Structure formats: C-alpha cells, structure tokens
Amino acid sequence: MLKTAVGVCKEEGVHKLWQGIHAAFARHILYSGGRVITYKTIKEKVFKIKPEDKYFPAWQSAVCGMLSGATAQYFASPTDLLKVQLQMEGRRKLLGLPPRVHGMYDAFQKVLRTGGIRGLWKGSIPNVQRAALVTLGDLTTYDLVKSFTLRHTNLPDGHLLHIIASTSAGLVAALMGTPADVIKTRIMNQPLDDKGRGLLYSSSIDCLRKTVIQEGFSALYKGFVPLWLRLAPWSLTFWLTYEEILLTVSGKHW
C-alpha cells in the first residue's frame, strides 16, 4: 500500500491521491445519509425498536443494516461508477493508454452516450452486495456493541463507549466488505463488448469464482489494509459526530 502511494506521488503527483474526490463527495452524500435514515426508519417503524431500548435481537439489527445499505448504495451507484473510472485514469496513463475521461462531468456524459441511463448502474449488483455487507458490519456492529456494553458493564453512554463501538464497527465492516469491494471494482472497471456486456466476468458470482480459482482465496482480501485504514477513521468520525448531533438536537442517544 505504501509503495503504491509513494509511486503515485512520484509518477503523478501528490494531488492524484485525491483523484475522483468530487465523485466521492457526491457518493457519500447519497450513500451515508441514505443508509442512516433508512436504517433508523426500518428499525423504529418496522421492528418498533425505540431509541431508548438497550436490547433488541441481533437478527433485526442485521436486517436493518443490510436493507439500508443495499437501498442507499443502489441510488448512489452512478457516483461510485464515476469515482472508479476517474481513479483508474492514473493507471491507464502509466500503461501508455489514452485517457478515457477528463473529469466527472465528461465521465458522466460518456457513460450516458455508451450505455444510456442503465449504464450509470453498471456494476450496481456487486456494489449493492458490498454496501449491504459493509453496512451490516458497520451500523449493526455499532448498535450491538453499544447495547451489549450498556447492558453488561457500568460504562456510561459517552465518548469512550462511542469510540469502542465505532472502532469495532470499522474493523468488522472492513472484514466483511473487502471481498465484495474487490469483486465490485473488477466488474465496474472491466472492458465491455458492443452490447455493453463484460468481457471478463458475466456476474459477481462469476468474478468471485474466477478470482478464487485463478488467484486463491487470499485475493479476495487484496486492499484490506487501505480499506480498513479508510473505514476505521471514517467510522470513528461519523459515529462521534452523529451521537453529538443527535444529543444536541433531541437530548437523546440513539
């Protein structure tokens, strides 16, 4: 990971580490906001779990996490596709290939021209699968660790508890999401034929099968460390901020 980062800085410049940041911002606005709202709505409206409840079945939290992650990611998939395409331009330049896109708007126009509206959801199935697993690992783990700690220890509902729960959530999310992230990235970045079908993989299952057969099971965890290093501070920052905002607005903890 460090060699890759140093190589990018030397060959393309430090600013290339932030390649695709505009698409990443757009994706997080849709995805992060959407999954939390959906999670909370399903939790309270469908399963009737109240904010003050310290115990609720793990399977209910798991269902909330997977459904909210999948729903939010489906609507955010076009921005994720643009982000991946923008981030791959540096690699294409090193290989001596001509650039495919020259910015987020240019990438958006070219996707529409070549694949139409449906083209914006290229790779959405593995994308949604990944989001369901990551959200299951993140939101569900946070909820369960927090409720378990409150029930079995004297630790108050404060910053230390939030740090413990969010750290656990980031680790589990990375463990569950890395294989799906590998598959998603490969499918979204594979070349297409004239009919818009992938030339390397026909589906996420096909990609999973070929990856394990050709490269071994460990290939599914390529990029685990950078993903964890991204999710860990993200989870910590998000949950501490969320709890503070919720406490300020309503005077209650979720």
Image: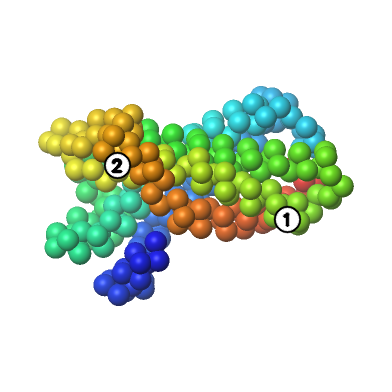
Residue appearing at x 38%, y 35% in the figure? 126
Ranked by sequence position, the earlier of labels 1 and 2 is 2
Amino acid type, residue under disc 1 in the picture = Glu
Q: Secondary structure beneath disc 2?
A: helix
Residue 228: horizontal and vertical position, in percent? 51, 53
Residue 39 makes an appearance in the image: yes
Quadrant that contains the N terminus: bottom left
Tell me if 188 is positioned left or right of 35 in this view: left
Residue drawn at x 65%, y 31% is 61
Viewer-proximal residue among 230 and 7: 7
Is there CB contact under 8 Å for labels 1 and 2?
no
Q: In this rendering, is residue 153 above or below 203?
A: below
Marks 1, 2: nearer the viewer: 2
Dot 1 crowding, Cα within 10 Å, few <14, some 14–19, many 20+: some
- Determine if residue 117 is in view: no
Q: Which residue is mark 1?
A: 244
The image quadrant that residue 145 belongs to is top right
In this picture, residue 131 sits left or right of residue 246 = left
Percent across and percent down for residue 169 are 61, 46
Residue at left offset 31%, top offset 69%: 7
Q: Quadrant of the C terminus?
A: top right
Give the numbered dot on residue 215: 2
Q: Amino acid at mark 2?
A: Glu
Q: As displayed, is residue 34 above or below residue 48? A: below
Q: Is residue 171 above or below residue 229?
A: above
Question: To which quarter of the image does residue 150 belong?
Answer: top right
Q: How far apart are the two marked residues, 1 and 2, measured between alpha carbons?
A: 45 Å
Q: Secondary structure at mark 1?
A: helix
